[in-house]
Amino acid sequence: MGVKGLQSFMERCCPQACVTVNLREMARRHAANSQQGFTTTADTISPTLVVDGMACLRHWYSCRDWVCGGQWKEYIDVLKSWVEVFTSAGIRLVFFFDGVVEEQKRPEWVKRRRRVNGEVSKMFGYIKEHGEQPGRELFCLPSGLATFTPFALRSMGQQVFCTVREADYEIASYARQHGSMGILGQDSDFIIYDSAPYLSVAKLRINSLTTVMYDRQRLCQTIGLPVTQLPLLACLLGNDVVSEEQMQHIRNIAMATYRKNQPAPHSAAPQGQVVLAVSQLVSSLWNREEEEPGLVPQSLNLSAPDTEVLQKGIRSYVLPGQKGLELGEDISAPPSASAFETYVSSEILKACREKHIAAEGFMVYNVVCAGVTECSNTLEDEEDAELLPQALVYKPCRQQIYGLLLLLGHDGSTVDLPAIREWFVFPGNPLREPDMVQPVPVSLPCDRPSLDLLWFSTGPEVSALRLTAFLSIFECLKLSELHGVIDDSLLAALCLVTYIVLQVQTLSQEDVDAYLSQAVCLRLKSPEELQQIELPLLSSRAVQLGSLYVRGLSHLLGANTASGCPLPSAALMPWHSFDGRLFHSKYLLAHSGTETTKLLDSDSCLSLFLQLRVKLTEICRKRGRILPSRPNAPQQRPKTTRHRHTGWSPGGGEAWRGRRDEAGGHRHERGWRERGDERRNQSEYENRKQSQPPKQSSGRSYNNRGRYQLAPSWSLPPAPGT
């Protein structure tokens, strides 16, 4: 969010502070100054631009298709081209990505996630009504883009950091410490930090390498404040730490004084006048009280809680080594230890942190060092009652990841182990509080191996144990037979699809064929060929299945890291096993009754596909999971159906929804989970007491692992159009 109204104020009321710059020329001047000793930086080899990766995602993802799960091969090409433009200009790039969500910013994170949920809901409504992708006004980033982009950039030889605290702070701190030529992002907080120049990625013209620089010195000249007072101004206007509502009364006072002293007010828009008014208030306090920079003036007459939050907000802008704003707390100190760190060795803690910062791991740092994990919005249809949200589908494997990290080598007792706090976004989850999730021990064939052995030891036995741990998390130990026989990326894809089939009882043979055929065929497709795939219409169900798969890859990545990396991380990247348009085309073909031979692109693809399908079927049958065939092609004229659903609807749709109270209490018309006054522990949904017999009349029952399955009385729905 940044500072409320500040950037628009600069653009409308302070145009002299918005300077168009050529990054090539800027880099040349920066290099010349460095060589003459005008800067005290270690990075004098080439000018460095620090990039806020999260702010760039929307600009990087320029692929035509975005709802089907992502055009990953095309996206990789876009990233490569983008990086090459800067490299050819002699500019070194350093990327930062958010690695944590600080608790003081959790309310703002929740607010944004709720807003995006509304946008996702509108997007699915449009797809079901029109059968096509909506325009950019409803654009949503493909699920998992923020997770996998750091790995993509690392594979291109770029330096990438994943933060251990607020990303804006680490970016500004790095840029200041290393004398970087600028910060490329889209957050007005970078105007407040006394660091490198802030350059707009939204205004960037990649062909000419020009953009707009927001000049903090010229801003300060316009509003009559020293740079050291910008943090107080930012907090009074409202930012991610100090909410806009908390300081509303101060702004009211400032506006009243401003109007009284300005018979002819500035022609700025109302928000611009607020910035001017608060700036004058801060300036008057500074001149009158002559207090040390950064301290909250007593004449503001704030309550103790408001003073505390204001000081916290001001302190969040103080960078290491910055003088004049000391407030009694070292914000540059590493986060304090958590209760979870007592369950792992110091070597594991060090390795977790190093992997996290270098963007080499996923999930483990936050679990081990903070006992928390989160997942942002996923493209999921809140009106689809047949598909579970990905947060629930992958919860069992997350529990085993937690168990592998925290319980391995211990006696298996979880009595004194704090639960992991999960902030996972899905329809119906109001995010008022985290879900408390208990770790589940992973059963391994040897006698309680330690996590240190799994991570640091060598030898064929340890390698085999790592693979066993990884596959056990997804209940696919039988797939070890294929390790070294097929590509690691296909082994990962088969493991993931098998897990999804075991967890989601509404998946059909056609869904599996779509998943596996696109994974097998993808290796033969160029990005250009994938772009040329034509889709007659879109299926909302296929959209959600695509996102479900990509979110699953992130869980594979977390399990792989926790298991000591039995598979190379590259094998788990989506551009090796998934393409949204290709999957969607295979989905439509499979559900239209296309023969298997025509579903595949060549004989070699066909034989490999059949090999994977046989192994998946074998594992599922041993678990009592029989895949039915339920072809259901989306209708060609979706507008003729008022409440069009592009997948199949067991039991006639409404009848199935009417049975919700007997199968977990989820109310379809209010989303998957209503957790307000009637909120219960999430485990009540996923882990029914085993002593309760299944209710056959409900149309589904719970198996002995807490997952729901169709009861024997279930029957196929009528064919479409009947």
Image (cartoon, grey):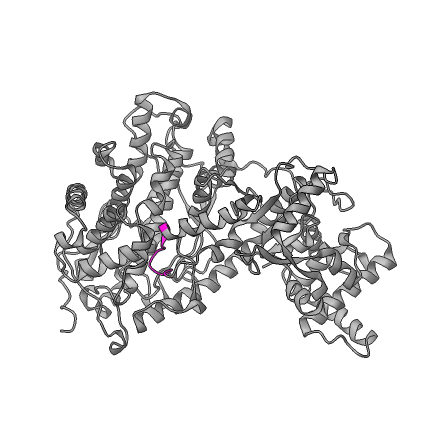
Q: Is residue 687 left or right of residue 108?
A: left
Q: Quadrant of residue 90?
A: top right
At 32% across and 26% down in the image, what residue appears? 463
Decide whether residue 69 is among the magenta residues: yes
Magenta stretch: give its range: 65-73
Farthest residue in the top direction? 459
Q: In which quarter of the image is residue 535?
A: bottom left
State whether residue 682 appears in this view: no
What is the magenta segment's predominant secondary structure?
loop
Picture coordinates of residue 683 (x, y %)? 35, 50
Which quarter of the rendering shows the N terminus?
Answer: bottom right
Q: In this view, does 349 lie to the left or right of 271?
A: left
At 51% across and 36% down in the image, what residue appears? 339
State whether residue 632 appears in this view: yes
Q: In the rendered view, tell whether residue 676 sits above or below residue 524.
A: below
Which quarter of the rendering shows the C terminus?
Answer: bottom left
485 or 170, nearer to the observer: 485
At 33% across and 24% down in the image, what residue appears? 462
